[in-house]
Image (spheres, rainbow, N blue to C red):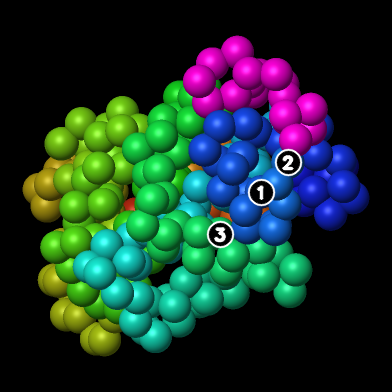
Amino acid sequence: MSWWGKLIGGTFGFMLGGPLGAVLGAALGHNFDEGLLPQPQSPYGRVDADNVDAIQSAFFTATFAVMGHMAKADGKVTREEIAIAESVMQQMQLSAAQKQLAMALFAQGKQDRFPLEQALQQLRSASHRSRHLLQMFMEILIATALADGHLHASEHKVLEQCANTLGFNEFEFRLLLQRQQASSHMHSGQPSTSSKLHDACRVLGVSNDASMEEVKKAYRRLLNQHHPDKLVAKGLPQEMMEMAGRKTMEIKEAYELIRKSKDG
C-alpha cells in the first residue's frame, strides 16, 4: 500500500516524527500521540531505509508546506500565488482528497512560525541525502517560483536557503536556477531560433560551443538523474511522477535542438 493509502486507511505507524510530522498532523487536523509516531533515533524522527512510504510522505509534506512559506515570504499571499500552487497540483493530477491535503499543507507553510530550516533538515535526513531526490524537490520549488514569469527577491531568498540547507553549494544552486529559467523561456512566447538554442544549452548545462560529445555526456547524466522510476524507487511520491516525466521531456527536447543545429 502506498503512503497515501496508509494515510487514508488510518495506518499512522509509518509517519514521521519531528517538524514534518507535526505539520502533516496539523494539516490533517490531528494531534497525534507519541505512540502513533515512530520512536525517534534523531532529533527529526526515525526513517527506516527501506520505508519508502515514510520518505514519500516527507517529500509530499515538505513540498507543499515550503510552497506556502515561499508564497508568504514577501508578507502576503496573492491570488496569483494560490493559483500557481493549484496549477502545480493539477499538473501532479492529485485527487480531490490529495489536493485538499496539499492546500492544508500550503496553509501550514504560511504560518509565521513554520520551522523551515528544521523541516528541510528532516527532509534531507529522511531522503538519506539522495541528491537526485533533493534536486527534484528544488526543481519543483523553482518551477513554482517562476510560474508567474518573475522571480521575486523574497522567493529567491527562500530558494537559496532551501538549497543551502539541502546541501547544494552556490554554484549548484545557480545551475539549477539557470536550467529552470532557460526551460521556462524556451516554452514562453515565440523565442527566436538562436534564443531557443541558447536556452537549450543552458537546460543541459553546457556552453554554446560545447562539442557533441560534451552535449551527449550532459544529456545522459541529466536523464539518469531524472528517470521517473528511479526517483520513485528513492522516495518520490507516485503523484509527482508526471512532473519527473515532464522534466525528462524538456531535457530530450533541448538535446534534440542542439543535435539538429550541429548536424545542420
| Quadrant assignment, res 186 | bottom left
Look at the picture and state if 128 lies above or below 56: above
**Residue located farthest toward the top when viewing the structure as drawn:** 41
Look at the picture and state if 97 lies above or below 70: below
Q: Is residue 48 left or right of residue 182?
A: right
Distance of label 3 from label 2 (alpha carbons): 16 Å
In x, y percent, where is residue 117?
A: 35, 38
Going from N to C along the chain, the mark reached first, 3 or 2, is 2
Q: Which residue lies under the disc numbered 1?
A: 25
Asked if labels 2 and 3 touch by Cβ distance under 8 angstroms, the answer is: no
In x, y percent, where is residue 213?
A: 26, 36
In x, y percent, where is residue 130?
A: 48, 27
At 80% across and 48% down in the image, what residue appears? 7
Using the image as rendered, state which of residue 116 and residue 207 is in the foreground. Answer: 116
Q: Which residue lies under the disc numbered 3?
A: 105
Q: How many marks?
A: 3
Q: Which residues are magenta?
A: 33-50
Asked if labels 1 and 2 touch by Cβ distance under 8 angstroms, the answer is: yes
Going from N to C along the chain, the mark reached first, 2 or 1, is 1
Q: Residues within 10 Å of mark 3 (few under 14, many from 20)?
A: many
Going from N to C along the chain, the mark reached first, 1 or 3, is 1
**The C terminus appears in which quarter of the rendering?**
bottom left
Residue type, mark 3 in image: Leu
Q: Which residue lies under the disc numbered 2?
A: 32
Q: Is residue 241 visible?
A: no
Distance of label 2 from label 1 (alpha carbons): 7 Å
Look at the picture and state if 72 lies above or below 222: below
Majority secondary structure of magenta residues:
loop
SS at badge 2: loop
